[in-house]
Amino acid sequence: MAREINLVPDIKEEMIKALKLRNFIFFVCIIVASVSVGVILLFATIAGGQQAIADGNKTKIETMSKKLKSYGDLTDFLTIRDQLTNLSSISKNKKLLSRSFGILTALLPKGADVIKISELNIDLTGTQPTITFDAQANAGEPPYIDYNVLDSFKKSMQYMRYDYGNYVDKNGNTIPAYCIIESGNDGATFSDAERGNYAYWLITGEGCNPSYEPLEVTNSEDEDDEEAAKADEALSEAEVYRRTEGYTTETYDDQTVVKIWRTPQFSDWYKTEEVEGEPYMNLSGAVSGVEHFESECIRYSGVENPNTGAVSWSSTNESCYLVPDGSDGIRITDSSNGRDSSDELVLRFSATITLTPEVYKFSNHHVLSFGPSGRYNVTDSYVQIQDMFTQRASDCDPNDTSCNDSKNRGGN
């Protein structure tokens, strides 16, 4: 039997193992050191490249900055740019003071009772606009100094409404407000005694037809001026035809317009089922297939008689109050007997009316103000106001027995 004899002492064997481990560690360290040097060199290269790019950009920026500062209109340009960025907020906060006259037209009574203003102050700076005025009331018949006129005027505040919204084409696209004419040269709203209110749409105006897509047409360079003019004229006629295609046009003030009814044409539009290409209105008041006005305040609804098939239509305006606080929105601060410029007996008084801010907002288009008897006026346009104002009435003379006579007071 063969036997193996280990001639290497144990300590020698441990030393050999230690040497192998040392050599392996040295080898790993060399590899790690080599990789580290490579990474450092890579980072140094990247850093150097970035620094070179940064230096190049810095030089470029300095050059461009000097060139930019050399422009003389730089300040104006920056000012215009800043203003353009603020256009949306400016438009949102913009208010139309001119609507006050239309509001007053709706507020002041018509008929036998007459109220005329002698001094007016409008404050739009607060959260709620206020109209403060000195006025005089004339009952129109003896007793002229009738406090019931003033009491009726105050109580009518709860019935004041307003309306606003957008005109749309037959496809439901909003027509820009500047393309709509709502009143004539006298400031009166367009209205038909039987069919209600309407407006004119400047359909051929630039940008006025939201559903219209213009054609791109170019003339050949070899055409002379006369031929080019004829081509342009023909193109213009084609453009007008395409812009008005599908609409019934008429002429108003030498302009091609389309009449749009603000008041729904119930008998013409109502159908039990929608027919493509025809005006349609259902019993819930939804309208399609015809150019019309989409109100933000007024809701229309119909009820059909099951026996006759006739439809009864009604309208409601439960959210847009001209004077939010109703009769509490008007404060009478002073009242007394007096005589007007014609020496007629009148009731002098001062009042402050608090209005809703919505009625003055520029962003709310096509605003109408409604009085308690359905009176209305377009406040976006000029209105006749000469009959609204008068000379301030004078206080009663102590010796004026007729003016001071209690018989001329219809109330207290």
Image: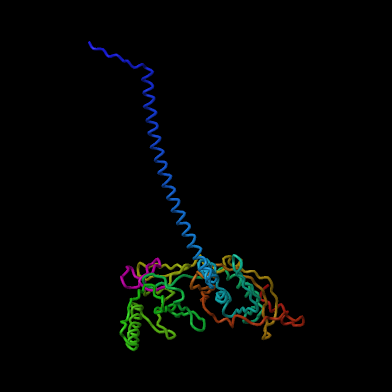
Q: Main secondary structure of the magenta part?
A: loop
Horizontal side of 51 relative to 239 (left or right) equals right
Residue 52 visible, this orientation: yes
Residue 43 vs 298, above or below: the answer is: above
> Which quadrant of the figure contains the N terminus?
top left
State the residue in front, 152 or 63.
Answer: 63
Horizontal side of 63 relative to 327 (left or right) equals left
Residue 91 visible, this orientation: no
Q: Position of residue 8 (x, y in %)?
A: 34, 17
Q: Position of residue 315 (x, y in %)?
A: 45, 69
State the residue in front, 11 or 101.
Answer: 11
- The residue positioned 39% from the left and 40% from the top of the image is 34
Q: Position of residue 49 (x, y in %)?
A: 43, 53
Q: Give the quarter of the image for residue 206.
A: bottom left
Question: Is 318 in the magenta?
Answer: no
User: Most extreme residue toward the right, as rendered?
Assistant: 399
Q: Position of residue 278 (x, y in %)?
A: 33, 73
User: Most extreme residue toward the top, as rendered?
Assistant: 1
Horizontal side of 198 relative to 142 (left or right) equals left
Q: Give the quarter of the image for residue 40.
A: top left
- The residue positioned 46% from the left and 74% from the top of the image is 177
- Start-end of magenta stretch: 269-292
> Which quadrant of the figure contains the C terminus?
bottom right
State the residue in front, 8 or 209.
Answer: 8
Horizontal side of 120 relative to 67 (left or right) equals right
User: Most extreme residue toward the left, as rendered?
Assistant: 1
State the residue in front, 279 or 243.
Answer: 243
